[in-house]
Image (cartoon, helix red, strand yellow):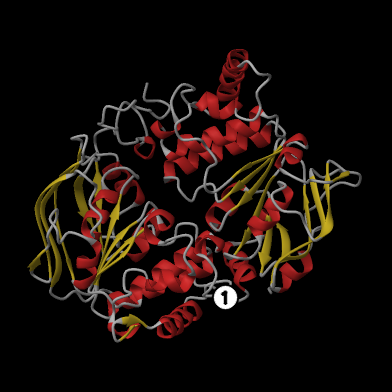
Amino acid sequence: MPEKAQKRGGPDAAPRSAGDVPAIELRGISKAFGPVQANRDIDLRVERGTIHGIIGENGAGKSTLMSILYGFYKPDSGEIWIGGKPVQITDSMTAIRSGIGMVFQHFKLVRNFTVLENIILGAEDGPMLRPSLARARGRLRELAQEYELNVDPDATIDELSVGHQQRVEILKALYRQADILILDEPTGVLTPAEADHLFRILNGLRDEGKTIILITHKLREIMEITDTVSVMRRGQMVASVATADTSPEELAELMVGRKVLLQVDKTPAAPGPTVLSVRDLRMRDEDRVERLRGISFDIRAGEIVGIAGVSGNGQTQLLELLGGFPEPGAKITGEVRVNGQMLDLSGRHSDAATRRARGIGHVPEDRQDEGLIMDFTAWENIAFGYHTAPEYRSGPFMDRAAIRADAEGKISRFDVRPPDPDLAARNFSGGNQQKIVVAREVERNPDLLLIGQPTRGVDIGAIEFIHKRIVELRDAGKAVLLVSVELDEIMALSDRILVMFDGMIMGERDPATVTAGELGLLMAGVTDPTQPAEAGIPPAQIQPADRSEDRLVKPEGMG
């Protein structure tokens, strides 16, 4: 631990005046799940009217600690003080009555309900819903205007972008009069523009006297928005510091317990023969909406090609189509060749198993819905899709011992925590779930790796490790297609950058010379930098129009 952090460490590190009453004080909180000690004797003090960051590696105990504060878990020992008074938080309703609201990484919304119905769910004024809805509509209008949380109250959740769904979660908490708001990895599923808007909302809440606890692994966000930051490592609190007095390098070292390389270390690419060739690829979904519009590009052995773009511009459909998961009922035309051989795009050989047999590895964007079977164990998921491989077989049967031994090796090499191959996938943190998927695909040594959002919800130490493995795969002569909404990640890892907008490739850029501003213009559909993006709207704020017949949800400023 750095010397100055040791001097400042501990729950009382943040400066305050004598007699100040903190919004939250946790004293000696411990929690174990069987042999796993998730939290160990944790002290934490959060001042009123501040944004307090909590960071740590995946599995460090951050979410468990906040789940205790919100009443999802009961601590084995310790005390919780709210506003200077001890409280017993036995469930989430007790937490809400204590003025605590929580926005989870995976939203808790009823998808076929409207915004208004989700807001009042569980907070109805009586058996008659009409008066409750009328009062909620008025209050919702006030909150939206006060905190820039504009969202259509009559839209169903399914019609909203991820960023707007998150606003609904925040509105739910504020409607229940929360003075303390906990956000767990709030930007993990947001575009950069949506994240910036969220930060403006959080700053506004703080200015109104609300207390914000922000759980995140992104050091840039910690440095940008928090007043104080606490660092957890392996279930313990190792430091609490004023954000202005620390640095990303110091926080990374506190999180991991060693120095961490915050930049990708790679040599120039040495491209070889073409591995992936895509020509005039087009796709209409079952609603006849054109999702891919004449996509053409090549990837050669020994290079990483990154695709930048605002989420929802066709990157997902491209990755799924190449990986053998075409949308049901989609009409697909064009040509895709891997190592010179044509791929079947919509016939009986267009499935993922055929893709794997052709040397294509696929880390999907959504690890829970597409990358894992959540009720299966870690060792079963590591064999998922490759269970017919010769090394996993003993005659006509699967060799369970061989699969477990292979899984244990991957779990160790990728530092999956806890290192338990028999634990169900749903019981790992999101970052450790991601490690399981990446380990399974990368260690098959594919000729072509398709990887979507590789470090979404992953801590700084694991990001460094995953980036290193991607570069090692490139240096071994493999081709990598990288899709990420993180511009920093795209620019750091890619040897060439393609930008997608509205299902089209808008251009190719060299990451060594391109600027984030230039990429932002292309992401907004602007190829001529002398022209405005759209009626004075900054490029990063423009969202793709939904060209289906669904209700169009527009970002603020677009009318």
Q: The N terminus lies in which quarter of the figure?
A: bottom right
Q: Dot 1 surroundings within 10 Å: few (below 14), some, or many (20 or more)?
A: some
Residue 330 occupies quadrant: top left
Q: Nearer the viewer, residue 499 or 74?
A: 74
Please give the name of the residue rendered at 70% of the width and 36% of the height, measured from the top-left corner. Answer: 210
Q: How many numbered marks appear?
A: 1
Up-down: is 56 above or below 242? below
The answer to which image quadrant residue 323 occupies is: bottom left
Which amino acid type is marked by label 1?
Answer: Lys
Eyeballing the image, is 549 above or below 427?
above
| Residue in view at x 53 percent, y 39 percent | 198
Please identify the quarter of the rendering in which residue 289 is found.
top left
Left or right: where does residue 267 sit relative to residue 130? left
Q: Please state the horizontal and vertical placement of residue 336, each as a whole percent of the image.
A: 12, 59
Tell me residue 192's x, y (percent).
43, 45
Q: Residue furthest front?
A: 396
* Residue occupying image coordinates x 64% and y 69%: 254
Q: Looking at the picture, how far across and down is residue 229, in whole percent?
A: 68, 55
Q: Which residue is labeled 1 in the image?
A: 259
Place of residue 245 in the rendered image (x, y in percent of width and height, measured from the top left) = 68, 58
The residue lying furthest to the right in this view is 19
Residue 502 visible (yes or no): yes
Residue 464 vs residue 283, the one in the foreground: 283
Looking at the image, can residue 265 be seen? Answer: no
Label 1 SS: loop
Vertical relation: 223 (above or below) 237: above
Q: Nearer the viewer, residue 199 or 26?
A: 26
Q: Is residue 299 left or right of residue 101?
A: left
